[in-house]
Amino acid sequence: MSKTLKNTVELSGVGLHSGVTTTVRLLPDDRNWGRYFVRVDLPDKPVIRATVDSVSQTTLSTELGNAEAKVRTVEHLLAALAANNIANARIEVDNAELPLLDGSAKIWTEAIAKAEFSTTASTEAIAPSEPIWIREGDAFVAALPAIETRFTYGIDFADYPAIANQWHSWSPGENNFNTEIAPARTFGFAEQIAQLQQAGLIAGGSLDNALVCSQDGWVNPPLRFTNEPARHKLLDLVGDISLLGQFPQAHIIAYKASHKLHVRLAKELALLPNGDRC
């Protein structure tokens, strides 16, 4: 069964790329509208649906938008909501980027856990009958037919021995997202910071909300997990795939992928006919 919030959850923090403080309020909505954002700082409070059709760009985060408004870096919150079966939520934001908080979904899941919920019937899940593969160089994402939902992520950073090659898997039916995936923080590379800042990105990034790795090792240890980077990439994947509305009944595998590839896979899954649903 899916869940709907019965009371309000509110958090504030700085956006990773904008550096601007934003307040987010998660509110009840029992109209079965799914998860959607409302830009309460703009005239007429435009609504942005948390669906694959709303994706407007995927450079170092996932941005949703329409002709009226945009909202950026939505993947951590959406992963926390979807992994906790919260299918319906009105998400009010007073700026264009969600707060990064500690760089993970941990604070989101802790706040959500304190809320009360009502239950609603689940919708049909997409269940591909044939493998779907999307490749870009040696990176790929895939959705394989499976009897249960599972996510697997692999990364390989040969130039950064502290990370190197890592893998992690998570299944909603077997593992606790809030303890095993949500605490994994975003990470970046010391040698790329100046370039990203010159490009107008990561204005809100700091050693308090992101792991930073150099070729000599981690700048700000300790890690929460030995494979924290792989777990964080899986967290991002969960958030991007949640744009389908419900996790597919499939084994979702990603290797050296990106938000762009995650979203391309979600769009391919969204196009499957009704016969590929259960």
Image (spheres, rainbow, N blue to C red):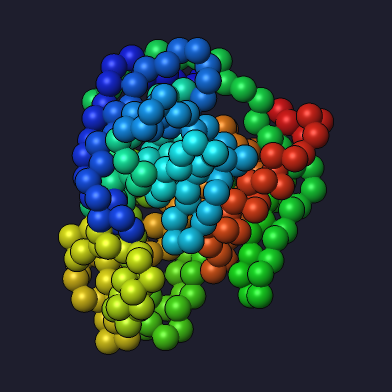
The number of numbered badges drawn on the structure is: 0
Q: Which residue is found at the position 71% from the left and 47% from the top?
A: 268
Residue 245 percent across, percent down from the top left: 57, 32
Position of 85 with respect to 220 (left or right) is: right
The structure residue drawn at horizontal position 31% and vertical position 71%, both measured from the top left corner, is 197
**64 relative to 153, above or below:** above
Q: Quadrant of residue 275?
A: top right
Residue found at x 36% / y 78%? 195
Would you identify the image quadrant in which residue 262 lies?
bottom right
Position of the C terminus by quadrant: top right
Foreground pick, 30 / 162: 30
Relative depth, front residue between 19 and 136: 19
Q: Is residue 134 above or below residue 30?
A: below
Tell me if residue 234 can be seen: yes
Residue 103 visible, this orientation: no
- Position of 252 with respect to 130 (left or right) is left
Q: Residue at x 38, y 71 (%)?
A: 199
**Which residue sits furthest front?**
43
Task: Give the quarter of the image for residue 140.
Answer: bottom right
Q: Position of residue 90 (x, y in %)?
A: 40, 24
Residue 106, image x, y percentages: 28, 45
| 50 left or right, relative to 198 | right
x and y, in percent, of residue 162 in the image: 33, 79
